[in-house]
Structure formats: structure tokens, C-alpha cells
Amino acid sequence: MAMIADEVLKAMKCKELETKYGNVRKGLRMSLVAFLKDNPSYEKLIDGVAGIDPADKKTEARRNFLDELGEISKLMDDAFNKLGDSEEGALAHKLTTVSAIYMERIGQTCLEAKTNYFPMHKEKFAMYVSEDQEAKSIVPRTTLKTIKNYLDKWFFLMQQYSVNAKAKIIYTKLNDFRDKLHHFEYVMGKSINKLQREYIKEIIPFMKDTKLALLRMRKFFEAIDASAFGKMISALTDIAMENGTRVYVKYNAVLTIVTGNVRKGSVIPVQTIVDKYDNVMFPIRQTVAELDTKLGGSRAKDTAKAFWDIASQITSFRDGMYSVIDEFSKGISPSDEDFKFFTHTAQAVIIPYMNQTKGEVNNTFLSGVKNLDTFFWKIMTKAIENSQEKGEKMDEIVGLAVRVTQKELESFLAENKELADDHLADEIENASSSSEK
């Protein structure tokens, strides 16, 4: 399907990234298969979103918000499928009649879907501002970008998890809607750009219905992201990022720094760092998991003994952690906030605590251990990003995102001038907004 220029460029960049990091992404998908097998609770979450009751696999899949996206897809197609090659007056008339009707239906479907599936999602209306008044401030191109950002976050993640049959159901539905949304944006932009300024007043009903439809679609997507589905996406993203980073390190045991606020050409033995960190953290993580009530366990009866189980590891932990910090410092600036927090946690929270002569495991220590894990992977991610010649981010490397900069877009349009008019025209949007007031 036809797409506007930035989506065409994004698709091209996606293929380049797939070629460049294909081994990492393949390794990630294999690791996610193993992860889901070992963590059935996450697979149950995916089952639920796919519309399958985890408690009864024989039941027919339940209808959910993904099915509503399918209905909206059909309406987006219908909104422009009768325009043909119409020009100016005829085009303005069709936009005002046929297309405006479908825009109203799109808006109504989005509103009903949000209300039916996410009734607890609170509206964010400003006081004394009606929905129609709020819609007047909508800029279609900007609002579509917001919607596409939500969609891409879900789409690329589920693409990586689609090695799982249920996750593939979600991915397929998102993929279909994404294709239709890109085409919808392209045809709308192409149609509006055909019209001269004198037809602006004629298409005000169309623009009014379009803005309301996009406002409601954005709110529908906000509700989806704020729901249990959004929380699942967040959790699965963290898992994919850590697994993807581990896979990258497996294929690239040593990094050479090419960017960042450190000496270029520095070499970091990341595989050695990961092995060393896992080794010194393993006994501590094991004890913390047993003690942490948030993980579903209960406090050990003999917390003093549990403390000494950890404290007995003090020498290997201290020496190993100082070595990890030293190796990281070759590729991460000492002024980096995440690196400083990681170092502070190890030196000011974990090591002194373990070095006490008496005491028991407390919440401060448990939090410190979790923070250490979180910031270790943040720092590892920065080290990997600092070794990328073209500045790719970690989520792009593992296939969870694709970004197009304004500079890249301008360069692309300079070489492909026929695509330059596909965007929704700002002057049309602004003029129609002025006319509505």
C-alpha cells in the first residue's frame, strides 16, 4: 500500500537494520521462545490479549479491542475508495459528502471501542472545553504521528514475540491496521494537496469530522496504552531489551567505542563484564528472590542467617564489582548519571551493607540490588550504542523501533521529489482551522 515519504523511508531503514543486525534479532527471537516456555505467566497474558481464555483453550476467541481496530481499518479504506481520480471541485464535493460520512463513523467507532473496552480510562478534557472545541485544536499530521508512535511501539515488539503462535495473532492484527493507517494518511494527504486554496471553505465539514475522528482515535490509543495491554507491552519490552542486549554481547564480545564523551577507540570486553557481573550477583539475587514478598515469596524465618549467606560473598562481590566498574569506565563517561548511580549503589549501598558485623536484610538492600541490575543493563546499552558507527539505538538494533531523523527525511525527499507532496499540507490545515473559528 502507498505510504507518505517518512513511512517509505522508515520501511527502507527497517530492511537495512534487519540485514545489519539479522543475527542479533534471530538470536533474540530464539531467546524469547525459551523465555516464554520458562515463564508461562507471560504466555497467559499474551493469550488473554489475543482473545483466548487461558483457563479454557477450547472456547472460541473472545472479541477484544484488536478486533475493533479491524473495523476501523475497513472504515479508513471506505473513506477514500470512491474518490478515484477526481480533481478540485469534484474532489472537494466527494470529500465533503462521502468521505466526511466515513470520518464520522471512524470517530464514533473509536469512541465506542474506548468506552466498551476501557470504561475506566479518564478523559483529559480541559475544564469547560467540549469535545468539539478540543477537536478544533487538532493538527491531523501531528495527531497521526502520535497514534503511529503508539502503534509502532506495540507492532515492533509483537513482531519479535511472534515466534509464539498467540503473539503472532496480535502481531498480524496490528500489522493489518498499521498498513491501512499508512495508506489512509497517504490518500488523505494526497487528496487535500490536490485542492487549491479556494476550496478550503468547501472542505470544512470534512476537516471538522477528520479532526474529531483523529482526536477520538488518539484517545482510544491512549486508553489501550494505559490498560493491562500497555503494562504487558512495557514488561515484555524490558525483557526483550535485556535478552537482546545479551544476544548482542554474545555476537560482539568486545566493543570499540566510536562516539560519546569518552576516548574514541577505547575497547570494552563486554562479554567478560556480563560473565563477571552475573557471577557475583547470582548468590545475592537468589537470596533476594527468596526474601522479596513482591515476587510472591515470604520473608525467610531466619533473616540473620540469610544476611550472612549474602555477606559471605563480600570479597568476591567487591572485587568483581570494582572490576566491572573499571571496565565500563573505558566506554562510559564518569559524568553519565546512570553510571554514577550504578557506582554509588555498589559502593555506598551494597558493599558497606554486606560489610556490617551485624544486621539483617532490609528493604534498602533489596532495592539496592534491584537498582544495580536495572542500571547495569542501562549502562551496557549505552556502551553498545557508543560503538555504533551510524548511531543506532539499542531498541533499533534488536528490532523494537525504527527512527527517521528530519535530516534523513530531507535528504530522502531531495532525491525523491515526487514524494514531497504526500504529507498533509500545513497551510490547508491552518486555513481550515481559521475558517472554523
Image: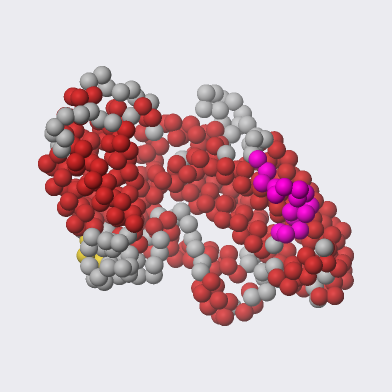
Q: Residue furthest left?
A: 315
- 348, 86: nearer the viewer: 348
- In this view, 212 is above or below 409: above
- Residue 237 is situated, as x and y percent measured from the top left of the image, at 44, 46
Q: Is residue 35 left or right of 103 when viewed as pictured?
A: left
Report if residue 276 is visible in the image. yes
Residue at figure coordinates x 56%, y 80% from the top left: 415
Work out which quarter of the rendered image holds the N terminus and state it: bottom right
Report if residue 82 is visible in the image. no
Residue at figure coordinates x 55%, y 39% from the top left: 229
- Residue 6 is situated, as x and y percent measured from the top left of the image, at 58, 67
Residue at figure coordinates x 78%, y 65% from the top left: 433
Quadrant in which residue 203 is drawn? bottom right
* Magenta-colored stretch includes residue 73: no
- In this view, 2 is above or below 361: below
Q: Is residue 242 left or right of 72 when viewed as pictured?
A: left
Specify start and end residues of the magenta stretch as a single range.
122-138
- In this view, 146 is above or below 352: below
- Residue 303 is situated, as x and y percent measured from the top left of the image, at 23, 24
- Residue 435 is situated, as x and y percent measured from the top left of the image, at 83, 67
Quadrant in which residue 300 is drawn? top left
Coloured how? Answer: secondary structure
Q: Is residue 231 left or right of 222 when viewed as pictured?
A: left
- 243, 251: nearer the viewer: 243
* Magenta-colored stretch includes residue 125: yes
- In this view, 340 is above or below 307: below
- 403, 43: nearer the viewer: 403
Residue at figure coordinates x 71%, y 59% from the top left: 138
Work out which quarter of the rendered image holds the C terminus and state it: bottom right
